[in-house]
Image (cartoon, rainbow, N blue to C red):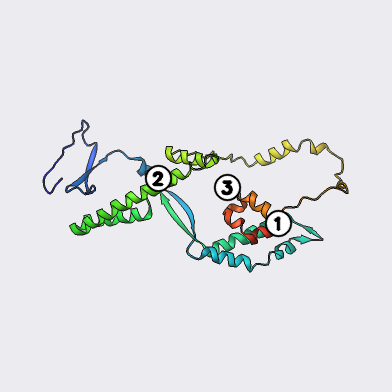
Amino acid sequence: MRGANALDLVYTNISGAYRVEPRPHLGYSDHMSVMLIPAYRRIVRHSKPLLKQLRTWPAGAISALQDCFEQTTWITFKEAATDSGTVNLEEYTASVTGYISKCIDDVTVSKTITTRPNQKPWVTAEVRMLLRTRDSAFRTGDREALRKTRVKLSHAIREAKRAHAERIHGHFKDTGDTQRMWEGIQAITNYRKTSPSCDSDATLPDALNDFYARFEAQNNVIAEKSIPPQNDQVLCLTVADLRHTLVKLTHGKLLDQITSWVVCSENVLTSLQMF
């Protein structure tokens, strides 16, 4: 519509299939648009939005975390987990990873975001803010503010789409990294893997233990520790070996979901080497 003039008409063979609401101008056009909203309940209405927890690293957080690690006496964790000359690896690992997670929580900021089924992957916080500003200017009838907001919104959308395209292209730069390439294909095809539901039977763990330990129940031989040969060399890992291995691990396979570059810091690797 341009003012009081209707430029286009829409016809449908179903009475009451749509309801009409005015919307702001599209791009730099001089006429406003009219949105036809289906009368049926759309997926964005009956599907609940998802809440996700994100961790953000403000300015100076990395240096503050490094200072925290440098001032930590890592040998204390090993001494606390040692009993009668034997180190309890489970207690040692839990104390070190718990301390690292606490240090990360102290220097980072956690926030909750809402994602909806119809949300585009390239939409950023800046684009959402400009969309709200444009709608507000349209409702108030301020033509000058609406014109300026439309220009800013157009530039922001163009930049957001360009940045999103570069992120997707980055998945295919290294042809040897098949995992990154698969993530890029999933992003292009909008592939969403459904998580399988867990069995709620409380007796399942006991049944599995009985099944896999059925041969051990009949074993009456007392286990004895074998004496290694005199020329047998003890496995020794250096900090470089640990870094080379841990840097290849994905986020889901690391200690307590800790970021890989945090685990690969010099102080943390030195503590892990003490294991």
Return the mark for residue 100.
Answer: none
Q: Alpha-carbon distance for marks 2 and 1?
A: 41 Å
Residue 48 visible to an observer of this rendering: no
Judge whether 270 appears above or below 232 on screen.
Answer: below
The amino acid at mark 1 is: Gln
The amino acid at mark 3 is: Thr
Judge whether 124 appears above or below 71 on screen.
Answer: above
Which residue occupies 24% across, 39% down?
Answer: 18
Helix, strand or loop status at disc 2: helix
Is residue 17 rendered to the left or right of residue 274?
left
Q: Relative to the observer, which residue lies in front, 92 or 43? A: 92
Q: Alpha-carbon distance for marks 3 and 1?
A: 20 Å
> Looking at the picture, how far across and down is residue 10, in whole percent?
18, 36
Question: Label 1 belongs to which residue?
Answer: 273
Question: Label 3 belongs to which residue?
Answer: 250
The amino acid at mark 2 is: Ala
> Considering only order in the chain, which callout, 1 or 2, is on the residue closer to the N terminus?
2
**Circle 2 crowding by C-alpha within 10 Å: few under 14, some 14–19, many from 20:** few
Question: Label 2 belongs to which residue?
Answer: 165
Q: How many marks?
A: 3
